[in-house]
Amino acid sequence: MKEAVEKTEERKNAFFPTYSVRSVYTLDFERLYEEGYRALFFDIDNTLVYHDEPALPETVELFARLKKIGFKTAILSNNGKERVKRFAEAIGADYYQEKAGKPGVKAYLNAVREFSLQKERCLFFGDQIFTDILGGNKAGVPTVLVYPMGKEKYFHIVLKRMLEKPFLYFYSRKHALWRNEP
Ligand SMILES: [Mg+2]
């Protein structure tokens, strides 16, 4: 099922995103196109994939879909050249900028210029308020705060540990019983 972007409250300050979404992978991008957006900029780590992981088959599929809808795509990452170049090429992004210097505005403005579009027709997706969102807002590019994938991964681990606890408890009890056996 496709998820519509959820517009946040009226933007109060530079730390407030225009929208927020749970994941870029379940998003209704066709609707964003209908709303007038023409270029999508993405952070990589914890936005498209877990930190430092390569592009997933789903990422490649997603960017093919975006292209088909008619979007121009760009990767703006503070990560190094090797990672960003390889990632952008694997997914077929139209433009990329490594060591983007977010929350500085330069990379955002360069991407806008690259596609000869109005800022309002671009949309930036990122997981970090103090780099991704702050930079986009300063540059005047609408922003989407994406729930960080790493956090989710971490949460899964925490959850797993929590679920493990009762098993460990009963296991240790059982173990103790065995030990108590004559
Ligand atoms: Mg990130």
Image (cartoon, helix red, strand yellow):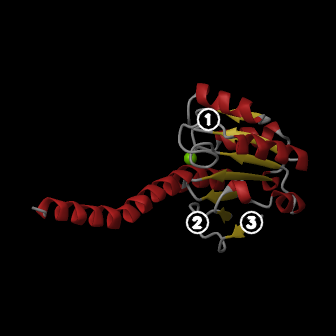
Under circle 1, the secondary element is loop
Q: Residue 104 location, x and y as percent?
A: 58, 43
Q: Position of residue 162 (x, y in %)?
A: 38, 64
Q: For mark 2, does the 10 Å Cα neighbourhood hold few (<14), some (14 to 19), or many (20 or more) residues?
A: few
**Nearer to us in this view, 27 or 124:** 27
- Do the residues under discs 3 and 2 have CB atoms within 8 angstroms? no
Query: Is any atom of residue 45 visible in this view?
Result: yes
Q: CA distance from mark 1 to mark 2?
A: 34 Å
Quarter residue 8 falls in: bottom right
What residue type is disc 1 on? Pro
Spatial CA span between label 3 and label 1? 25 Å
Image mark for residue 54: 1
* Amino acid type at mark 2: Asn
Give the residue at x 68% y 64%.
Answer: 19
- For marks 3 and 2, give the CA distance: 26 Å
Residue 13: give its label: 2
Label 2 residue SS: loop
* Residue beneath disc 3: 3
